[in-house]
Amino acid sequence: MGSGVILVVEEDGVAFDPDLGGLHLVSLRDLRLGPRQALAVSGIEVRQWQA
C-alpha cells in the first residue's frame, strides 16, 4: 500500500471514536476490497494536498 494510504481521523468534522481505534485506513492503490486496520502506526507525515 505504501504511498497510496490515507489515515482518516474524522468525517464531516466529527472525530472517530477513540474506543474503536480513532483511525480509518483508506488504501488508494488496493486491488482487494474490504476494511483495513491501522494498528501499528509509527508516524504521520503531513503534506500539502495536490489536486
Image (cartoon, helix red, strand yellow):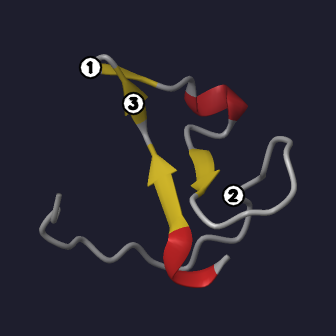
| Helix, strand or loop for disc 3 | strand
- Residue at the image position 78 percent from the left and 51 percent from the top: 36
Q: Residues within 10 Å of mark 3 (few under 14, many from 20)?
A: few
| Helix, strand or loop for disc 2 | loop
Q: Earlier in the sequence, mark 2 or mark 1?
A: 1
Question: In terms of depth relative to the viewer, which is nearer, 7 or 22?
Answer: 7
**Rounded to the nearest whole Å, what is the CA distance between mark 3 and mark 2?**
14 Å
Residue annotated with mark 2: 38
Q: Is residue 18 above or below residue 29?
A: above
Q: Which mark is residue 21?
A: none
Question: In terms of depth relative to the viewer, which is nearer, 36 or 21?
Answer: 36
Q: Which mark is residue 13?
A: 1
- Amino acid residing under circle 3: Glu
| Helix, strand or loop for disc 1 | loop
Q: Is residue 13 above or below residue 39?
A: above
- Residue at the image position 15 percent from the left and 65 percent from the top: 50
Residue annotated with mark 3: 10
**Rounded to the nearest whole Å, what is the CA distance between mark 3 and mark 1?**
6 Å
Q: How many marks?
A: 3
Answer whether labels 3 and 1 touch (C-beta < 8 Å): yes
